[in-house]
Amino acid sequence: MSDVIAAPPQPRVPVRGTDQTFPVHRIYCVGRNFADHAREMGAAVPASRADRGTPVFFLKPADAIALQSDVPYPPGTNDLHHEVELVVALGKDAPVGVLDPADAMSLVYGYAVGLDLTRRDLQGAAKAKGLPWDTGKAFDHAAPISAIVPASVAGELGERVLTLTINGQTKQHGSLADLIWTVPDILHELSKLYALRAGDLVFMGTPAGVGPLQPGDRFHAVLEGIAEHSGTIVAAPTV
Ligand code: MN
């Protein structure tokens, strides 16, 4: 048997400090994982962890990762938004069944910092009609990401801070201590719905301060003490 077309390239993220790469299987994303961001989006904020219900999940295609510095402004939107996020990279398949949160961290290969780029106008229109978020979230170059840092190098996540500056001005700043759902919580919840695999990336949700990006804007995302990623939004080619 042979392929009828050339096999599409496997999306891969470099591993920092090595000549190795991390092949990407799926990209899972968590919505509303910081109370201050849920509040700014007009969503209900749980009174306590016991009242948090179930997390909001969506996916991006694996080839939405954008490693290059120049990120094209996507078509079909007039309101592209930045969301800086911790990205968790899984290095092992989850066992069959529901993953025990106590075992979850053993699946983690490493961490990166990324942007969950969002066509906020399309997402907002979809939300208002109860329709899927795909066109707002899952598009080409929608997931700029740093190199992955192995967990053995990164150390504990603890209360590290996520920061995003645009043109040198701080727009987002939030501590991982404020995650509504921690990494073990999220892997546990995802395992109820999907077979988690080596190669999966999980975008863990964004703190408050999301806002618009324009062509020419320079972004700098930092996961304190672990990873940084910079780039520029560029006008997309029109022909
Ligand atoms: Mn997000």
Image (spheres, rainbow, N blue to C red):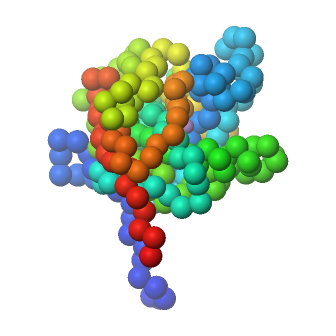
Does the image show residue 114? Answer: yes
Residue 229 at x, y percent in the picture: 30, 39
Quadrant of the rendered structure where residue 101 is?
top right
Q: Is residue 170 left or right of residue 149?
A: right
The residue sitting at 66% across, 51% down in the picture is 122
Furthest-right residue in this view: 129
Q: Quadrant of the C terminus?
A: bottom left
Q: Give 234 or 114, whichever is nearer the viewer.
A: 234
Residue 78 at x, y percent in the picture: 57, 51
The residue sitting at 27% across, 23% down in the picture is 225
Residue 181 at x, y percent in the picture: 59, 24
Quadrant of the rendered structure where residue 95 is?
top right
Residue 40, above or below 60: above
Q: Is residue 171 left or right of residue 135?
A: left
Residue 91, above or below 1: above
**Which quarter is ligand 1 in?**
top right
Does the image show residue 66? Answer: no
Residue 196, above or below 140: above
